[in-house]
Amino acid sequence: MDFNEHTATEAVQNSFRETPDPRLRELLDALTRHVHAFVRETRPSVREWEQAIEFLTAVGQTCTDTRQEFVLLSDVLGVSMLVETLNEQEGGTESTVLGPFHMVESPQHALGDSIDLVGEAEPCVVSGRVLNADGAPLPHAQVDVWQCDEKGFYDVQQPGSQPPGNGRGLFRTDAEGRFRFRTVLPSHYPIPTDGPVGRLLNATRRHPYRPAHIHFIVQADGYVPLTTHIFVAGSPYLDSDAVFAVKQSLIVDFARSDDEEAAERAGVRAPFRHAEFDLVLSSEPA
């Protein structure tokens, strides 16, 4: 069979027919079908296709141990959020993207510890419970958190001025499923624009900003792991997140308090911010 515009898709699909893994075979079959349909529809020139290959090559070359440009590309195309949405479990807290900055292991902390290793901004207390879909607390659940500082930078972005592990923490809930930690109010910030994904945003006149948020990964035995954010109510860009991750149920009020007694109990100084919310896990399918 000659390889031409009309036979190309079938020829490539046939080449994968003996793939032992049925799921891999299904994925490659669909990928071939959709990529070929895209090429037929848009009819790129040879130079345009070369530019596409050069762009993807640059994305890969930009990846390091502390930066994941492919995740960033998936995020700005809305693919990360689409995958999260399609895999969301009913009855639990809504999920959002992992993001490109969960690149290092969070340091372990005791409940109530501060993940702010710099201590120059308005303090913030974050607390809540990890529950199952029936409202029962989940003791000893693992709560992994990470966030940017008050200026919008993660520790891995400023290795010279932020100590490693700043804004990160790994906690275990208590017997009542509660967690709590001290931190600073994160800022809205731009995703990295000094690489190929940034050039793509510039070429399409899209802004690179994300609203202020704190990341969470929550895990407990017998439950589906949850990857989500908590967004700061009133933050800029809640309506136009560059990675499409905002959900109304995840917007939380970080209220300011001048209560000195409450501040002392929390181990911070007044005034301070306080956010409280529950994170609900769905049971693993039988």
Image: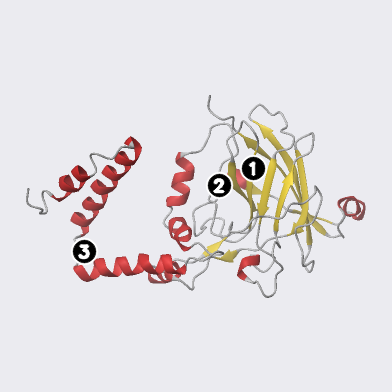
Asked if residue 176 lies left or right of residue 186, the reply is right
Q: Position of residue 119 (x, y in %)?
A: 79, 66
- Which mark lies nearer to you, 3 or 1? 1
Query: In which image quadrant can residue 130 be found?
Result: top right
Q: Please, what is the three-letter code of the amino acid marked with disc 3?
A: Pro
In this picture, residue 146 sits left or right of residue 247: right
- Mark earlier in primary sequence (1, 2): 1
What label does residue 218 carry, if any? 1
Q: Nearer the viewer, mark 1 or mark 2?
A: 1
> How far, Cα to Cα, is label 1 from label 2?
18 Å
Label 2 Cα crowd, 10 Å radius (few <14 / some 14-19 / many 20+) = some
Q: Residue at point 11% right, 48% down?
A: 7
Kind of residue at disc 1: Val
- Relative to the observer, which residue lies in front, 213 or 256? 213
Which residue was labeled with disc 2? 247
Q: Is residue 3 above or below residue 133?
A: below
Q: Alpha-carbon distance for marks 3 and 1?
A: 44 Å
Please state which of residues 2 and 32 is positioned toward the viewer in this rendering.
Answer: 2
Give the amino acid at mark 2: Lys
Q: Callout 1: few (<14), some (14-19), or many (20+) C-alpha neighbours within 10 Å?
A: many
Asked if the residue under mark 2 is in contact with the one under mark 1, i.e. CB atoms within 8 Å, the reply is: no
Along the polypeptide, which appears first: circle 3 or circle 1? 3
Q: Percent x, y for residue 144? A: 67, 49
Q: Residue furthest left?
A: 2
Q: Quick check: marks 2 and 3 in contact, CB under 8 Å?
A: no
Image-quadrant location for residue 283: top right
Please name the residue that numbered disc 3 is placed on. 44
Secondary structure of the residue carrying tag 3 is: loop
Please say if 238 is above or below 121. above
